[in-house]
Image: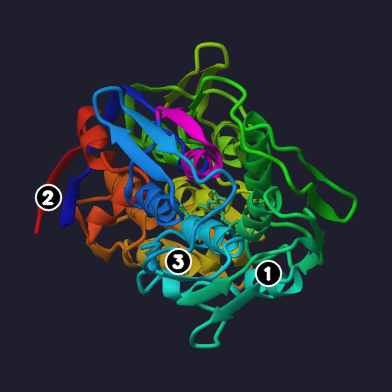
Amino acid sequence: MDVTITPSQVAGTTAAPPSKSYTHRAILAGGYSDEVTVRNPLVSADTRATMRAVNAFGGEVIHNTETGTLEITGFDGNPEVPEDVIDCANSGTTIRLATATGALADGSTVLTGDESLRSRPQEPLLLAIDQLAGRAQSTRENGQAPLVVGGPLMGGSAPLPGDVSSQFVTALLFAGAATDAGINIALQNELKSAPYVDITLDVLDAFGISARRTSQGFSVGGRQSYRLRDGAYSVPGDFSSISYLLAAGALAGNESVTVTEAYPGPQGDQAIVTILEEMGASIDWNHETGELTVTAESLSGVEVAVADTPDLLPTLAVLGAAADGTTTLTECEHVRYKETDRVGAMADTLSKMGATVDEYENKLVVHGSESTLQGTTVDGRADHRVIMALSVAALTAAGKTKIKGAEHVDVSFPNFFDVMETLGVALSRSE
Ligand SMILES: O=C(O)C1=C[C@@H](OP(=O)(O)O)[C@@H](O)[C@H](O)C1
Ligand SMILES: C=C(OP(=O)(O)O)C(=O)O
């Protein structure tokens, strides 16, 4: 599907979609448990991949469309050897978390995904699993999926680089609780995307699993049982998704845009609120009611290190292109290992729209004052975040912008374009 966006002003109130990161973890923790209800889950292409993984390991995930809940019967810490290959589609979180889960089973698990996923790095996790007495291989021996993993993983200590993906840490903490020995992770360098491990610790704690930071990295004790403390697990709103709504309101609001279900918590991407304030947007955030309101002002450029918040880079690049002055996004090398190289993708697509952008290995500089965005046809690179960020850029461009392959928003925000329409965006869909 292609979406053509006419420059529009936005206003109104909309609810934040449920968090993708929390939903993946709640589904997997439900899989590791006995019986669990997950309220307010994100049901999207990526979280469906994690549901498939839990089913493959012998659990059962049922989406009750009447209550909007997921009813999970878990495999209770003992994943079965899957009957078939697990298709993780486009989801990095799924393949990493399911790879470590597969390493617990007494047999082999085969995992693969789409072309994008099969190009993303997995080697550090495979080496760690080997170190922990499991077996893990890339079929092409290039550190990428398809992967074959076998167990049972005993646990122990493993070194891990911190600058490729925090999902390796998350994967080992989830699986480590079900090993005999537990797992100690020794980080070899500073952890990027660190708040995502805070989300992991938050979900593990809710499921009664004790895991912690150590002076070297992280540690989880073995022989623990996943048992949800409360009757059901409720997923909070997603701040990465919220970032597009706030950016639209900050750049193209004729009145304010209010996002509900925006409660403060461990999500690193809630930094979008302070970054927008620093750029000059007017924001009102009621932490108790979860209402977050933005009113458009003229924005000025900022310097932001995205080490902790990689998923904000596309949104920030667009904000920078529409702001006065220069926006510099630093510590962004790991943002190249996503569904696409998002540093390169934003540099190319925003340049095509008329922005002046300088791309460096670990830095993206957007010269807002030298940029006049023009509507044109851009390729969404089959990447949900690139597509959503470009949709926001299109609101302020001169003329219409056509975004190709826009259906990929189904990865994290399936009704993104419907929500944009309810906020006043004029758009059309075509095949
Ligand atoms: O654990 C998670 O839920 C995620 C971690 C981050 O990835 P990396 O840790 O690979 O940077 C983030 O970019 C991704 O969208 C979701
Ligand atoms: C990178 C992302 O997710 P994943 O790593 O799970 O594919 C994302 O949602 O931007």
State the residue lying farthest toward the right: 215
Going by the image, does 349 lie left or right of 228? left
Q: Which three-letter amino acid code belongs to the residue tagged 3?
A: Ala
Residue 250 in sight from this viewpoint: yes
Question: Quick check: 143 above or below 249?
Answer: below
Earlier-in-chain disc, 2 versus 3: 3
Residue 429, which numbered label? 2
Real-space Cα separation, disc 3 to disc 1, in angstroms: 36 Å
Q: Which residue is mark 3?
A: 347
Query: Magenta stretch?
Result: 23-40
Q: Residues within 10 Å of mark 2 (few under 14, many from 20)?
A: some
What residue did someone put label 1 on?
A: 129
Give the vertical position of 127 relative to 163 (above or below): below
Residue visible at 19% across and 47% down? 5
Q: What residue is shown at x 45% (from left), y 25% (from top)?
A: 294
Q: Secondary structure at mark 1?
A: helix
Considering the image in quadrants, where does the N terminus appear?
Answer: bottom left
